[in-house]
Image (spheres, helix red, strand yellow):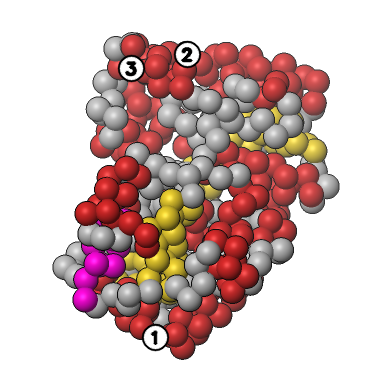
């Protein structure tokens, strides 16, 4: 098939990973993909880039003006989609949903092609809660509903998110949950845990690991506090693979508690280096989660067979089963995270059993980008998608 892939993302974070991996997987299955995006003309692999200018623009303009500019961008993107479609002659349009982005819907109606809409978050709800809220909330709700109801297939990343989609009046038969996945090839040559620890100078430690951009709500500060408590083994070491706005606070907290030598931040590293770091984890941390998300870090933990600790939220329970591939704790219960962490750090056999359960999960649920691409192609191929 020929897939016209459209997105409005200009970042190098997890969004870019999702975009890059889905495109690569579709191509690996033998399909042609043409990308239409803000920075697509920078060449292969340039799936993102610096977004400082976006943040500066947002800070300078009144919110209502910025939101109207987002909606107006749909016309710019529509023209680019139509120009690409005339040359490429696609069989379907695949769009990564963004707020006020209606270009894919407009092109679908003009071209008579199926539109598959990937949804990673309920953005009206999310932006209402963060970043100072929305100035044009009624317009935003209209645009979100228009985009979701207009797509031939809506692809939320969790069943929890699917409920947000259904609440807009999208028929159930058009909603297909496709969680985030993993590229096995990227993790196939990861070192053994012993070798990974030796490379990082962490021999003999029980390594508590976290990957990604660490923010205050992630709860990593609770891990540091627990490490200073009598219930924590003296050989625990926290390894944060990434960076984030609370790094300085966490490092100061570790120094204050006398743990400076037991907490390591790698800073931003290349994606290719992630497997060699995650391989060193004994306990993989997901201390908190957005209630509708499908965390990419979780897939990395699972593919490398790590004992996971996570809250027992409905979205994570779509993938994790307590005492099978993770230890889950009640996030509303005081001290539950710390007690669960203590149990896992003191019990090597339990960690090994959960690690095996984690490793089995990827194949059992087919949590790979190739599997996701196959599902997308099935959906794009015609009426039989309802039987998928």
- Measured from the top left, where is residue 192 in percent x and y? 63, 72
Displayed quadrant of residue 277: bottom right
Task: Give the spatial CA distance, label 3 vs label 2.
Answer: 18 Å
Displayed quadrant of residue 287: bottom left
- Residues shaded magenta: 220-230
Label 1 CA crowd tier, 10 Å (few <14, some 14–19, many 20+) = few
Does residue 299 lie above or below 3 as drawn?
below
Q: How many marks?
A: 3
Q: Earlier in the sequence, mark 1 or mark 3?
A: 3
Does residue 26 lie above or below 11 as drawn?
below
- Measured from the top left, where is residue 81 in percent x and y? 66, 21
Q: Which mark is residue 165?
A: none
Q: Residue at x 79, y 49 (%)?
A: 28
Task: Give the spatial CA distance, label 1 vs label 3.
Answer: 49 Å
For label 2, the residue is 72
- Mark in the foreground, 2 or 1: 1
Residue furthest to the bottom: 349
Q: Nearer the viewer, residue 226 or 340?
A: 226
Does residue 338 lie above or below 142 as drawn?
below
Label 2: element kind:
helix
For label 1, the residue is 347
- Mark in the foreground, 1 or 3: 1
Label 1: element kind:
loop
Q: Residue at x 32, y 49 (%)?
A: 251
Label 3: element kind:
helix
Quadrant in which the C terminus appears = bottom right
Q: Find out whether residue 215 is within the magenta segment.
A: no
Q: Find out whether residue 221 is within the magenta segment.
A: yes
């Amino acid at each position: 098939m020929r897939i016209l892939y459209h997105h409005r993302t200009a970042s190098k974070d997890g969004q870019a990973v999702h975009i890059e991996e889905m495109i690569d997987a579709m191509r690996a299955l033998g399909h042609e993909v043409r990308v239409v995006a803000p920075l697509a003309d920078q060449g292969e692999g340039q799936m993102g880039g610096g977004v400082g200018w976006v943040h500066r623009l947002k800070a300078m303009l009144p919110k209502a003006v910025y939101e109207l500019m987002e909606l107006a961008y749909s016309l710019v993107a529509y023209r680019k989609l139509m120009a690409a479609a005339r040359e490429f002659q696609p069989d379907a349009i695949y769009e990564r949903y963004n707020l006020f982005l209606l270009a894919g819907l407009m092109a679908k109606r003009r071209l008579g092609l199926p539109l598959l809409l990937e949804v990673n978050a309920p953005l009206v709800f999310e932006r209402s809660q963060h970043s100072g809220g929305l100035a044009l909330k009624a317009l935003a709700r209209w645009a979100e509903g228009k985009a979701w109801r207009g797509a031939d297939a809506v692809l939320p990343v969790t069943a929890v998110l699917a409920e947000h989609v259904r609440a807009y009046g999208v028929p159930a038969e058009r909603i297909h949950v496709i969680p985030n996945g993993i590229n096995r090839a990227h993790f196939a040559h990861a070192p053994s845990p012993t070798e990974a620890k030796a490379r990082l100078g962490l021999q003999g430690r029980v390594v508590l690991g976290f990957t990604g951009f660490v923010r205050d709500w992630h709860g990593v500060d609770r891990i540091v506090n627990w490490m200073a408590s009598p219930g924590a083994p003296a050989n625990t070491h926290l390894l944060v693979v990434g960076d984030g706005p609370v790094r300085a606070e966490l490092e100061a907290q570790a120094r204050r508690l006398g743990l400076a030598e037991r907490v390591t931040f790698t800073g931003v590293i290349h994606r290719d280096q992630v497997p060699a770091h995650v391989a060193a984890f004994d306990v993989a941390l997901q201390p908190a989660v957005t209630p509708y998300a499908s965390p990419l870090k979780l897939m990395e933990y699972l593919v490398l067979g790590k004992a996971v600790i996570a809250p027992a939220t409905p979205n994570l329970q779509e993938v994790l089963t307590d005492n099978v591939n993770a230890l889950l704790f009640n996030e509303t219960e005081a001290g539950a995270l710390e007690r669960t962490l203590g149990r896992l750090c003191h019990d090597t056999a339990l960690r090994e059993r959960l690690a095996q359960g984690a490793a089995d999960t990827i194949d059992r649920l087919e949590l790979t980008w190739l599997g996701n691409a196959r599902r997308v192609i099935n959906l794009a191929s015609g009426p039989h998608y309802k039987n998928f």
